Image: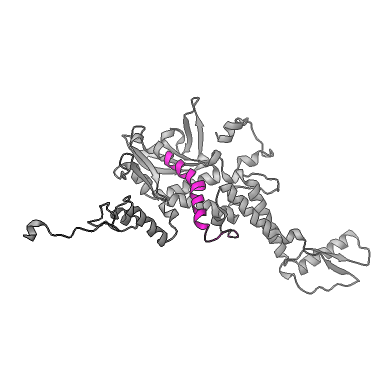
Amino acid sequence: MSFFDRLFGKPETKALSLTDPGIEDLFGVLPTASGIAVSARTALRVPAVACAVGLISETTGNLPAKLFLRATKETKTDHPAHKLIHEEANEWTSGEELRTQLTLDALLTGNGYAHVVRLNDGTPFELHRLDPAKVRADQKDDGEPFYMVEMSGGTRRFVYQDILHISPFGETSPITLGREAIALAVAFEQHVANLFKNGGRPSGIIKSEKSLDVPAKQKIAASWFKTHGGSNSGGTAILDEGMGYDPLSLTLVDAQFAENRLEQIHEIARVFRVPPTLLFELSRGTWSNTEQMMRQFLTLTLSPWLKNWAWAYSRCLLTPEERKSLYIEFVTDDLLTIDHATRATAYGQYRAMNAMTGNEVRAGLNLPPHPDGDRLDNPHITTPDNSAPEDEAA
């Protein structure tokens, strides 16, 4: 049951016929006020939607997730969960690829699922993606969730610890929530395509001095479209019997369609909570606000997804007792790295305040550790002790 179902009440269950308007929702085809049905497949044909979906899912998948000890903040690499989240989810799927797939499922359908395969002693061994269409989430009277999954041997019931579940805000796909904005973007695309299909010229009026019956008018119109429409537009027209052609001028509404299409990119950006500059809408983007936009992307867009993933991992891969001493967190440093100069300045300040050792800085730069790199002294003010031992001096 989704968040909105719990908020407004679960909808009444009833049988639907193929002529019932509600049948469109059942198959993921959502009618809109503009008359354009929106589904996950049609929504991805809108470049802004495809860009937002790919940006969120791929960035979530590519960010490294690690298992840490709460007491020392060290990485716990010998736990089975670390391999599943940081290395490979199974023999044919990496941990990054599984996160990308499940986040994509959640964005398009509202839910992403993976089955936790365990050894005989209950140790998590592999994570297998499940088709969202074959999973039904439900809950007991006390609120504890469980899942019914259609498998080759029939429908099986799984407890919540065995199904890794990822969902967006309200447990509803952004495509469903923003279907009106997406449909309007599709309508703009179709209008502009039809306009330029006719050479970027609006229709006109054919005038005749004689009175014509309906079949004659239809025949003249069909002949005109065939001769001067589409790729034939712009040619020389020859009219006889006193007929003439008056083209209609391009209206102000048609001329502003580019501006209206730009506004739809902003609407779609709001639906997915992505800064417009990251959808390559750069009319208001500057060099000075690019870093701030990236911070907004991390804080407003990715942070809820990463927290959702961290808890989903912890719920399925760690026992309640292990969660007291272990936690899962995503490393987001790379998102905030703008250039080498800024990065070098930050590392220099951390070293000066004794917050990082030389080897910790080298690890951040993907360099091997140095034998003398574990000291916290400030290299800018500390003079190394190069004096020889007393026994050697003697």
Examine the rendered structure and indicate whether residue 260 appears above or below residue 89: below
Q: Which residues are magenta?
A: 282-311
Residue at the extreme right: 210
120 on left or right of 214: left
Residue at the extreme top: 141
Q: Is residue 296 magenta?
A: yes
For the point 33% across and 57% down, which residue is it? Answer: 366
Q: Is residue 217 magenta?
A: no
The quadrant of the image that shows the N terminus is: top right
The quadrant of the image that shows the C terminus is: bottom left
The quadrant where residue 256 appears: bottom right
Q: Is residue 104 visible?
A: no
Chief SS of the magenta region: helix
Residue 299 image point, x, y percent: 49, 47
Residue placed most toward the observer, 258 or 204: 258
32 on left or right of 99: right
Residue placed most toward the observer, 23 or 67: 67
Q: Is residue 74 visible?
A: yes
Residue 333 image point, x, y percent: 41, 52
For the point 37% across and 43% down, which residue is it? Answer: 126
Residue placed most toward the observer, 328 or 239: 328
Examine the rendered structure and indicate whether residue 276 appears above or below residue 231: above
